[in-house]
Image (spheres, grey):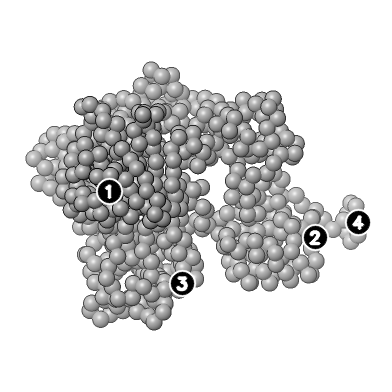
Amino acid sequence: MPARIVIVGGGIAGQTLCETLRERDEDVEITLVCAEEHLPYDRVNLSELLVCDEPVEERLGLRPEEWYDDQDVTVLRGRRVERVDVHARSIGLADGETLEYDRLALATGSNALVPPFPGMDLEGVHVYRTPGDCDAIREGARTASKAAVIGGGLLGLEAARGIQAQECPVTVVHLMDRLMERQLDADSAALLLPAMCELGMEVELERETECFLGEERVEGVRFKDSSTLEADLVVVSIGIRPEVSIAETADIDCNRGILVDDRMRTSEDGVVALGECSEHRGTVYGLVAPIYEQARVAADTLLEVEEGSEYHGSIPWARLKVAEVDLVSIGTVNGERSAVSHDQSGRAYRKLVTQDGRAAGAIFMGDTRGTEAVLEAIRTMGEVADPLEWLTEAAAAGPEDLPDEAQVCDCNGVCKSQITAAVVDEGMSSAQEVMKVTRAGTACGSCKPLVKELVSIAGGGDEGPAYLCACRKQTREWLANNIREQGYQAVSEVSDACGTGRECGLCKPALAYLVQELADNHHREEHHARHINERVHGNIQNDGTFSVVPRMHGGVTTPDQLRRIADAAERYEARLVKVTGGQRIDILGIKKQDLPHIWRDIGMPSGHAYGRGIRQVKSCVGTDFCRFGIG
């Protein structure tokens, strides 16, 4: 009888473990218990939700719902685990249901660290950790007059940039004397500060928050020196706390995190832990890269692989995800010896740190050349006789100079030799194919440019057929023939029969168009298969709001229609009203939740400005008025 494995936690760690288990064992029963209502999503890029209010599954979803059906993974959403009984080998859910297991994985992640400041419960005060937090922050930023972000670490700076994207002035308040003090030294932090200020943020360092001011809604921040800062939106981002409460119900040994050994085993038989909730050799890793390595080891342990792999820790590295600032920090930032290349005028900073004559850490800001070579040297503790010379050589090295064992994708543990073998030995010709098979570049995505270069160097680079569904290697022509022959009239019919769109789901809008075209509009519309613009009859903009374009044939309208358009634009706080080149009126800056209401109030059909089938058709007033018009 197949083993029953229950995974508690629907984050990146839980999802990665699901995929790793299924890749290695087709029969084991897998149940994934998610406390949130969403399917597993990419928390690394959570800041994208601060500027765009697309559904989480569309913007950050790791897999579409069909994938779990295909892989025979049972997903329980919105189900919180309250207790673990290791003796009965069962878990108790908040709704009273009990699930039995043979082996258990705890991937419960972490929660935002909430300080005991008076005023934390005021309206307008938020932490930054979940999609719900992002929704609240984004909506608050659109109406707030001034925002404050408490915390100048990686997440705090990303949150501040997201708030600023809503055209809300923001001040970053940080306790320490420099931003990102865990990842940067004093010199690089001194370069980061003006770079963030040039983006329009204000930064206040060495400010200790005492409380938040206000009666019902936050009005400001008071500091320990009695000074204050006005703010009607406050975001607290001062760190994370591993979620260990479930483990504690079973008396599993915990410190800051759930204690695990090199096989990711906890103190209780049959229970492993991984991700941000786990603590290995005194370290809790709040980064995504270690999760993939831990998942491989945890899978071996859960499947009882003899002489399975072991986890020996990870090199901490971080990249600031603010588009205008290119910043990477690897390993330790202070050591026995260091070499620095500093171009203050160009704001380029490169530092290599050594310990006992071996590479131990690095900082790159503005000029990130050689990052992969340095990361490999730090990972292998490579000898460095002259740090400055080594740093210079690393900057000049290209992808072809990387050793075969150099790790290209730190998230998924893919080295250069695997990418080369995929091209040379397996005959793959495109980077897309290589990334699909090796999984390089499919997590945080920062290594995609390097993967493409290595594929080209290995003799690939020919992108091959233009697949409509890249996951299943299905071209438009192949799918069109199947749709014609079988008479499919809905995306779900094609998906069920051919598997199209069931891996990543990105091809569904193109597939919907193909079905509609081949069925000569006698198809069955399915809401889930349409692009967001077509589902809501609005054009999504770069800030997550939408524009709407009422239909005006030939630019002809009436005074009554213009009044309704003007009234609706004011009522729903449109940020811009513009006459388009196609003789229509574009109303921009409308919130997604207001779209049904604005269409109702305008009382006009949509102008079909979302499919982009026909553009810029112009007309004149014709023979009724024009002396030269054509009727």
Of callouts 2 and 1, the N-terminal one: 1
Crowd tier of the residue under label 1, counting other residues whose Cα lies within 10 Å: few below 14, some 14–19, many 20 or above:
some
**Left or right: 115, with 630 as reference point:** left
Residue located beneath label 3 in the image: 144
Residue located beneath label 4 in the image: 623
Q: Measure how far apart labels 4 and 3 are at the Cα level.
A: 52 Å
Say which residue appears at 74% left-offset and 64% top-offset.
603
SS for callout 2: loop
Say which residue appears at 41% left-offset and 61% top-offset.
133
* Residue 32 image-quadrant placement: top left
Q: Measure how far apart labels 3 and 2 are at the Cα level.
A: 38 Å
The one of 373 and 166 positioned closer to us in this rendering:
166
Label 1 is placed on what type of residue? Asp
SS for callout 4: helix
The image position of residue 224, as x and y in percent, is 23, 77
Whether residue 467 is situated above or below residue 121 in the rendered picture: above
Q: In this rendering, does residue 317 appear at all?
A: no
Of callouts 4 and 3, the N-terminal one: 3
Residue located beneath label 2 in the image: 556
Of callouts 3 and 2, the N-terminal one: 3
The image position of residue 467, as x and y in percent, is 55, 30
Residue located beneath label 1 in the image: 85
The image position of residue 559, as x and y in percent, is 79, 70
Label 3 is placed on what type of residue? Ala
The image position of residue 368, as x and y in percent, is 31, 43
The one of 303 and 92 positioned closer to us in this rendering:
92
